[in-house]
């Protein structure tokens, strides 16, 4: 019998050892794994992008913002962090609930436990045994757990604020990228008019060169100008593609697909004074709410460090059952009070208390620095918006001037007084001035959104 148990034990030990080697030492083909994951990612990304873009791939600003808030990867990460903080708070609350542990075992020996006594054999236990035990612990006085739970509550609020701030930043990114694309698209008009002007100049200069009234170098210069303006159009097209790719990335979609955008004629916002904007930012910015919570968490850390000097008290109880017939009482209840207090741990708790106090000071300084940075951000955004408004006013005046000049030259052109190339030149100026005005309007929308963002509004 003993030999049988020994051989069985050795067999099971060898079996589990070989199983461990097979599972733990299995090689992974990293190239195949990367290939498979890449196929799944690309297929999923393309399908998701098609579902959002629809048939015509045309999006409005509001639709882009909605897609980004629903699908942006950074925002999804922030949402997960918020959920994790909520779970951490719930886990911290478990320290106040009773702790129950149930244990059960069944054992057998090939023969009963027998000892020799007085020249004979005496049995001390049954051959087959069953044991069941239930232990209960209920915390009563655990100050450290209280402060840890308070910190987890503030951590949950902090993660919510960070998620809300992430939404605001994503909204700003979409608005900025969207209007930047439209401003680049508007420049196409002026570049095309400049190209027409260059072609007409080249035609006239070439005609003069054939008559001996222009040098070959002059024709070459115009050809260089024509090529330069063709490159400007190509460069602007590439910038639009890159900007659209960036917008798609912000929305969590495939950057390589093509989209078209509706024109964004946003309202011109009226802002209060710079001082009022700074006051609003100091009251509404999510970062300052976060800093406030960081200070409160630092205070709780000091309290937690102090609580390490205090005892932890709890109630303990238990029930045990043993099937051994040689025991007089098979069922046993136990109960009492448990108290644990750290007397000396190498000054660890003392140094933790000092460290917590330093972190509290650090949190106050970080908050002051954040306030200063926010004031600077509001000041900078306000000045930039003022500059854009001034440039826009100038661009409107310039457009009126060149339109008036164009109207006058148009009459002269009808009478045959000026060359067509000169008329194309002023037409190019009108297109350039018009594109500049529209581009500045889009930039005005961008910096208005920036100013709203830095004062903590959507």
Image (cartoon, grey):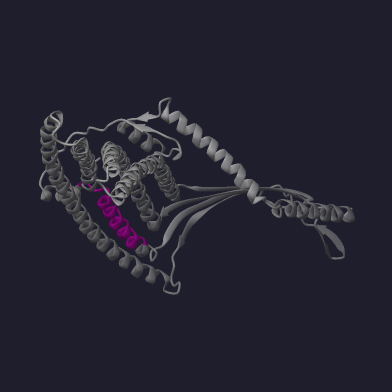
296 is within the stretch colored magenta: yes
User: Could you say which quadrant of the image residue 420 lies in?
Assistant: top left
- Image quarter in which the C terminus is found: top left
Q: Residue at x 35, y 30 (%)?
A: 59
Residue 334 x, y percent position in the rendering = 55, 52
> In the rendered picture of this protein, how many numbered marks are placed on residues?
0
Left or right of 310, for residue 447? left
Residue 108 x, y percent position in the rendering = 78, 50
Q: Residue at x 34, y 70 (%)?
A: 354
Q: Residue at x 35, y 68 (%)?
A: 355
Q: Residue at x 31, y 68 (%)?
A: 358
User: Could you say which quadrant of the image residue 373 lies in?
Assistant: bottom left
Residue 233 x, y percent position in the rendering = 34, 41
Residue farthest along the front direction in this orientation: 211
In terms of depth relative to the viewer, which is nearer, 54 or 410? 410
Q: Is residue 225 visible?
A: yes
Left or right of 327, for residue 457? left
Main SS category, magenta section = helix
In terms of depth relative to the viewer, which is nearer, 133 or 328? 133
Q: Is residue 132 visible?
A: no
Boundaries of the magenta span:
284-304
In terms of depth relative to the viewer, which is nearer, 123 or 287? 287
Residue 104 x, y percent position in the rendering = 66, 47
Residue farthest along the bottom direction in this orientation: 346
């Amino acid at each position: 019998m003993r030999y049988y148990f020994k051989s069985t034990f050795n067999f099971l030990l060898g079996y589990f050892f070989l199983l461990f080697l097979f599972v733990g030492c299995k090689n992974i083909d990293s190239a195949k794994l990367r290939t498979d994951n890449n196929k799944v990612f690309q297929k999923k990304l393309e399908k998701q992008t098609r579902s959002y873009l629809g048939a015509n791939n045309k999006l409005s600003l509001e639709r882009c913002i909605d897609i980004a808030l629903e699908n942006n990867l950074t925002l999804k990460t922030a949402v997960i962090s918020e959920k994790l903080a909520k779970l951490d708070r719930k886990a911290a609350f478990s320290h106040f609930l009773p702790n129950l542990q149930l244990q059960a075992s069944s054992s057998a020996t090939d023969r009963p436990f027998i000892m020799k006594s007085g020249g004979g054999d005496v049995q001390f236990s049954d051959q087959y045994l069953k044991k069941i035990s239930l232990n209960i612990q209920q915390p009563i006085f655990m100050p450290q757990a209280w402060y840890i739970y308070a910190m987890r509550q503030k951590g949950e609020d902090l993660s919510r604020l960070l998620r809300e701030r992430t939404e605001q930043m994503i909204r700003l990114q979409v608005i900025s990228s969207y209007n930047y694309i439209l401003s680049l698209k508007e420049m196409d008009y002026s570049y095309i008019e400049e190209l027409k002007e260059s072609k007409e100049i080249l035609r006239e200069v070439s005609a003069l060169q054939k008559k001996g009234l222009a040098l070959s170098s002059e024709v070459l210069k115009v050809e260089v100008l024509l090529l330069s303006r063709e490159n400007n159009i190509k460069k602007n097209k590439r910038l639009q593609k890159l900007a659209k790719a960036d917008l798609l990335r912000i929305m969590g979609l495939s950057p390589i697909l093509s989209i078209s955008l509706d024109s964004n004629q946003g309202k011109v916002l009226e802002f209060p004074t710079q001082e009022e904007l700074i006051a609003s930012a100091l009251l509404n910015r999510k970062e300052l709410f976060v800093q406030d919570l960081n200070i409160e968490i630092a205070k709780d850390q000091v309290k937690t460090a102090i609580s390490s000097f205090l005892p932890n008290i709890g109630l303990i109880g238990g029930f045990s059952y043993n099937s051994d017939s040689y025991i007089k009482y098979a069922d046993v209840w136990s109960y009492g009070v448990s108290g644990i207090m750290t007397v000396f741990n190498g000054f660890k708790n003392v140094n933790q208390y000092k460290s917590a106090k330093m972190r509290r000071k650090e949190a106050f300084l970080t908050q002051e620095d954040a306030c200063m940075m926010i004031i600077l951000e509001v000041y900078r955004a306000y000045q930039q918006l003022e500059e854009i408004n001034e440039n826009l006013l100038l661009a409107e005046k310039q457009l009126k001037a060149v339109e008036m000049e164009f109207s006058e030259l148009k009459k002269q052109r009808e009478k045959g007084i000026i060359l067509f190339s000169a008329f194309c030149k002023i037409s190019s100026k009108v297109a350039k001035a018009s594109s500049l005005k529209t581009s500045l309007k889009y930039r005005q929308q961008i910096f208005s959104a920036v100013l709203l963002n830095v004062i903590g509004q959507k």
